[in-house]
Image: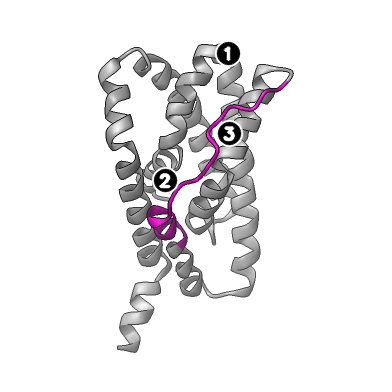
Amino acid sequence: MNYGVLALTFISVNLDFFVMLLFLLRRYRTGAVMTGYVLGTLILLLASYVAGAALHQFLPEWVLGLLGFLPIYLAFRSDDDDDGAHEAANPVWAVLITYLSVCAGCNLSIFLPVLVGKTLTEFMMTALFIGILSALAVLFVRGVGRIAGVRQFLERYGETTMRVCYILIGLYVFWDSGLIHQVLSLI
């Protein structure tokens, strides 16, 4: 299991949501934001793992490498997501619903190819790692939210940085699945 790729995947998938976290942290307590965010992340991670496990039963791993096109596609498509926070009765639910509505498509598209073919143990280690990263991200964003220069950088370069990360993840999926080796063996 490549924790560097997992960290890059987590950061790139959530980079745009980190800005949303700035707003959520102004509105709700840190603990509520962290709980909702970690729950949302783990729900989408589980959905990606289950979908990947189902696909892995029917297709060879190198064919599943074609899923690497999903993050690359996301890097080049226009982003028309609704970034507005959704109102809810309690703050945890508000953060959870906001995260799922804003990030479900990207998270499923990006994590599915990364998790396909992983064992249950590898998935559990991944879930623990991503859960910890999610909690740390909330704390980090809370601290960074106080720095004006960071907000300006994200507004100016955040989209481009996220797209580059998506492309790198897609290329990694091509390589890690054996797709590139399979294609080169046909040439």
Determine if the magenta segment contains residue 124. no
x then y, percent, for residue 21? 48, 24
x then y, percent, for residue 120? 61, 51
Q: Amino acid at mark 2?
A: Thr
Q: Amino acid at mark 3?
A: Tyr
Specify which label sits upstream in the sequence, 3 or 2: 2
Q: Circle 1 is placed at which residue position?
A: 28
Around disc 2, counting alpha carbons within 10 Å, would you say few (fewer than 14), some (14 to 19), or many (20 or more)?
Answer: many
Q: Are marks 3 and 1 in contact (CB under 8 Å)?
A: no
User: Gap in Å between the C-alphas at discs 3 and 2?
Assistant: 16 Å
Say which element carries label 1.
loop
Q: Amino acid at mark 1?
A: Tyr
Residue at horizontal 43 percent and vertical 60 percent from the top = 73
Image quadrant assignment for residue 137 = top left
Say which element carries label 2.
helix
x then y, percent, for residue 92? 65, 21
Q: Circle 2 is placed at which residue position?
A: 9
Q: Nearer the viewer, mark 3 or mark 2?
A: 3
Around disc 3, counting alpha carbons within 10 Å, would you say few (fewer than 14), some (14 to 19), or many (20 or more)?
Answer: many
Residue at horizontal 34 percent and vertical 73 percent from the top = 180
| Residue range corresponding to the magenta coloring | 70-88
* Main SS, magenta residues: loop
Say which element carries label 3.
helix
Residue 125, above or below 73: above
Image quadrant assignment for residue 146 = top left
Residue at horizontal 54 percent and vertical 41 percent from the top = 103
Quadrant of the image containing the C terminus: bottom left
- How many numbered discs sit on the rendered protein? 3
